[in-house]
Amino acid sequence: MTTPPPLTDRAALLRNRARALAAGPALFLHEDAAAEIEERLNEVNRRFTAPAVVTGFADPWARILPQAKIVPDAEVLDLEPGAHDLVVHALALHWANDPVGQLVQCRRALAPDGLLLAVMFGGQTLAELRAVLAEAEAKLSGGLSPRVLPMAEIRDLGGLLQRAGFALPVADVAARPVSYRDMGHLMADLRAMGEGNALAARRRAPTPRALFAQAARLYDETFGDGNGRITATFELIYLTGWAPHESQQKPLRPGSATHSLAAVLAAIPPRKD
């Protein structure tokens, strides 16, 4: 069987992150996600004593889980089997060449009844930027180049948790609109997030300035807010799953019901209007 080509150029991704850290990173989305994860942990009636965090940027996550083992999001995660009662995969899964493999490794790292919380960018992230770059490039060159990372839709991600062996899987989403002065400032912020183009299939030749100028005009015209600014959407998808344990709720086996639907409906008294 032919192995598909990788989505992500890992060397380019690590360079982008290193440049962001050296210049002073913009980690406000990590901080937002960490605050949401912290709130979710507070709602779980459990004390976690052996957490781990998989991330490309440690600081926002170390603040909410100071005792956690911080693990880079490498292809092979530095996690010992069964060693953790909590694993947080923190805003890195969208760059994984094998997202199911990442989740499987997290599952193996959890003790029975351990908790996975993952957050990643979803398919509606940067929809505006994706649209104007595609339109501008089509007008100027008649073709398209891979410029914005394709990201998973929420409808697919619950299935990934099940494939990775998690029990009680849940996927939910939150949209985070961010206002920018112009497209140039948005792209500068993406570089400061370490979220520049690290696609393996990206165009290696320099991008013509005319393309970005055209895209910026389209952005202002199509997604301006009427006050001289533009909006960029970041979609954060949260995944929750548990390592299986005998104490967890389980669905009934097919055919194990003790009452038929017809009998239940017959027992309901007729409605009197």
Image (cartoon, grey):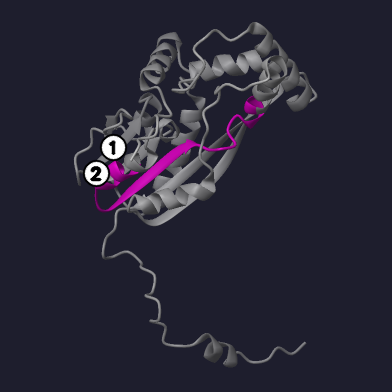
Q: Please tell me whether residue 191 is drawn above or below residue 4 in the rendered image.
A: above
Are dots 2 and 1 in contact, CB under 8 Å?
yes
Residue highlighted by disc 1: 52
Mark 2 or mark 1: whose residue is earlier in sequence: 1
The stretch drawn in magenta includes residue 122: yes
Residue highlighted by disc 2: 109
Q: Nearer the viewer, residue 94 or 175?
A: 94
Mark nearer the viewer, 2 or 1: 2
Q: Secondary structure at mark 1?
A: strand
| 78 left or right, relative to 172 | left
Q: Position of residue 1 (x, y in %)?
A: 33, 41
Indicate the quadrant where residue 141 lies: top right
The stretch drawn in magenta includes residue 147: no
Q: Is residue 44 visible?
A: no
Q: Position of residue 158 (x, y in %)?
A: 45, 51
| 95 left or right, relative to 177 | left
Mark 2, Cα crowd under 10 Å, few <14 / some 14-19 / many 20+, is: many
Q: Please tell me whether residue 271 is drawn above or below residue 111 in the rendered image.
A: below
- Where are the magenta residues, as a range? 103-130
Q: Nearer the viewer, residue 88 or 200?
A: 200
Cα separation between marks 2 and 1: 9 Å
Q: Please tell me whether residue 130 is drawn above or below residue 196 in the rendered image.
A: below
Amino acid identity at mark 2: Ala
* Residue pictured at 38% horizontal, 39% vertical: 99
Amino acid identity at mark 1: Ala
* Residue pictured at 40% horizontal, 10% vertical: 22
* Residue pictured at 77% horizontal, 18% vertical: 228
| 258 left or right, relative to 212 | left
Q: Position of residue 207 (x, y in %)?
A: 58, 10
Q: Secondary structure at mark 2?
A: helix
- Figure quadrant of the C terminus: bottom right
Indicate the quadrant where residue 139 lies: top right
